[in-house]
Image: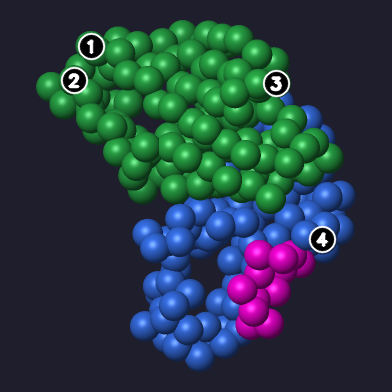
Chain colours: A green, B blue
Amino acid sequence: GQSLEQPSEVTAVEGAIVQINCTYQTSGFYGLSWYQQHDGGAPTFLSYNALDGLEETGRFSSFLSRSDSYGYLLLQELQMKDSASYFCVPLSGGYNKLIFGAGTRLAVHP
Amino acid sequence: DAGVIQSPRHEVTEMGQEVTLRCKPISGHDYLFWYRQTMMRGLELLIYFNNNVPIDDSGMPEDRFSAKMPNASFSTLKIQPSEPRDSAVYFCASSPSAGRIYGYTFGSGTRLTVV
C-alpha cells in the first residue's frame, strides 16, 4: 500500500527560499521523484533520490531520509515562473509506474 | 528529439460518440503510460505498456476504455461510448527502462470535452 502527505498549498515571494515537504509510506520503497507541472502544462521531471542526502540541480535541491520516510524539495531564489504544482512520487522497487498524489501548489508573488 | 507527441490537442465530442486519442512515444523508450487528469481526481494512471505489451490496466475506469500499442512508435486510447464524466486532460508518457531514475517524459496532453 501507499500513503503520501504534502502540503496542498504554499505561498512565497520572489527571491525567497521555499521547502516543500513530503512524507510517505510505501511498501518496497525504492526512491523518491519530484515533478513540476505548470497550469495547462504537462508534468516534467525534476529530480530523483535513491539514497539519503541532498541532490542539487541549479536552484532546486531534493532531499531524502529513508529512515524517516521523508523528503523535501528546496527551491531557492524563487522566480515567478516557479509558480506551479509540485508532486513527490515515491517509487516501489520492481514497479515502473508513477502514482501521483494531489501535489503542492506553489504560488510565488512579487 | 520531438518528445512525446499526442494528438489531437483538443477534442470536443458529443456524448455517446467514440473518441480516439493518439500517442507517439520517444524512440527507444520501452515504457508507455496513459494518465488522466481532472481537478477532482488529480493525475490518475490508466494503463501502462512495456515493449508494446499491456502490463497493468487496473486504472482503466471501465469497459468503455481500451488502449492498444500495435508497435513501438504508436499507441491509442479509445473511449466508446464517451460520457461527460470522461472530460479531462489525457496525458501519454514514455520512459526508458530506467525511467524512474531519469524521469518520465510526458506529452502535451489531449484536452477532451464531452458534451
Q: Dot 3 corresponds to which residue? A: A50
User: Relative to A82, is A43 above or below?
Assistant: below
Nearer to us of marks 3 and 1 is: 3
Q: Chain of mark 4?
A: B
SS label for mark 4: strand
On the image, the x and y values in percent for residue A64 come to 59, 19
> Which amino acid lies under the numbered mark 1 shown in the image of this protein?
Gly
Q: Dot 4 corresponds to which residue? A: B54
On the image, the x and y values in percent for residue B56 come to 78, 60
On whether residue A108 falls in the magenta region, the answer is no
Are callouts 3 and 1 both on one chain?
yes
Q: CA distance from mark 2 to mark 1?
A: 6 Å
Q: Dot 2 corresponds to which residue? A: A13
Residue segment shown in magenta? B57-68
Q: Chain of mark 2?
A: A
Dot 4, how many residues are within 10 Å of its Cα: few (below 14), some (14-19), or many (20+)? some
Q: Are marks 2 and 1 in contact (CB under 8 Å)?
A: yes
- The residue located at (48%, 22%) in the rendering is A72
SS label for mark 2: strand
Q: Chain of mark 3?
A: A
User: Relative to B87, is A59 above or below?
Assistant: above
Can residue B87 be spotted in the picture? yes
Can residue A48 be spotted in the picture? no
Q: Dot 1 corresponds to which residue? A: A15
| Of the image marks 2 and 3, the number of the one nearer the N terminus | 2
> Which amino acid lies under the numbered mark 3 shown in the image of this protein?
Ala
